[in-house]
Image: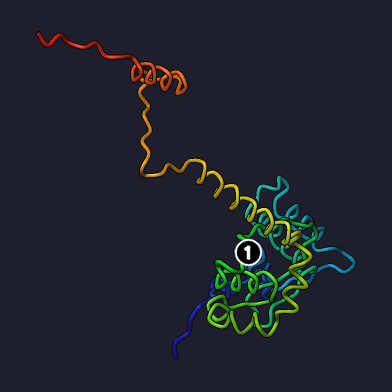
Amino acid sequence: MTQGVIFAPGEGHTPVSLFDKYTETLSFIKIYGGKLIQKPKNLTYQNWIKSEIMRSDRRCANIIKLLFSALKLRVSKLTAKSLKLVDNSGFVHKRSKSKIIRFMNFNKEIDHEEFVKENVMLFLPWRDEMKMMTSANELFVNNKKLIYEKRSEFVYDEDFETILNEAKTQMQETTNEEGYTPNNLEVFNDSSHEGDIAIDLTNQKIINETPKKEKDLC
């Protein structure tokens, strides 16, 4: 029969998560020797950790344990205000401060497909983006009323935007008309040919009316 000696009780049982059972005891084997310790009653986790650190090192030089405890305390506070996901993949919590979410605001008539995807992503709950994208049109049609109700809380004056776009288009068309030159006319940019049309026409008339001198035939 083979016998073995265990020098480090708890060896190989290092916890994976901060919230595994006996995580402090198993994470710091050199301090606790793999033995379980009882958390003092009527003492918060923060004060208990302070006491443990001071007991093992009066100078509080055991930084690893200090950081470990601080991280666990921080995560504990966050999870206390959060909801755990059904598949245990993480937590979600309600935003305490309002935040501006910028989006492209695609035109419904020009980019209808992108408009549908964008509104489904913004105003309907979803988890799997790829799955949501493949059924975006169906989700949009089935939840159109809800989407537009939520959209109205964030997108204002859509009619004004339409009017503005029409005005820009009309201005652009007017500019194009002003800059249009018919093909049967020529435009000269040479400054040496500048002149007054009325004066030029008058001079031409004078030249035409000047009697020609008759030449002697003999």
Q: Which residue is mark 1?
A: 28
Residue 10 seen by the camera: yes
Point out the residue furthest to the left here: 218
Give me the residue at 70% from left, 55% from top: 56
Q: Nearer the viewer, residue 155 or 191?
A: 191
Give me the residue at 55% from left, 77% from top: 133
The amino acid on which the numbered mark 1 sits, given as a three-letter code, is Phe
Indicate the position of residue 89 as horizontal and vertical percent values. 62, 76
Indicate the position of residue 25 as horizontal and vertical percent values. 67, 69
Point out the residue furthest to the right here: 42
Indicate the position of residue 177 as horizontal and vertical percent values. 51, 46
Residue 51 falls in image quadrant: bottom right
Indicate the position of residue 52 as horizontal and vertical percent values. 75, 58
Answer left or right for 13 relative to 51. Answer: left
Answer left or right for 156 relative to 204. Answer: right
Q: Nearer the viewer, residue 144 or 53?
A: 144
Q: Residues within 10 Å of mark 1 (few under 14, many from 20)?
A: some
| Above or below: residue 94 compared with residue 182 | below
Answer left or right for 124 relative to 186. Answer: right
Query: Which quadrant is home to the N terminus?
Result: bottom left
Residue 15 seen by the camera: no
Query: Which quadrant is home to the C terminus?
Result: top left
Residue 129 falls in image quadrant: bottom right
Q: Nearer the viewer, residue 94 or 197?
A: 197
Query: What element does badge 1 sit on?
Result: loop
| Above or below: residue 198 compared with residue 8 | above
Give me the residue at 68% from left, 85% from top: 142
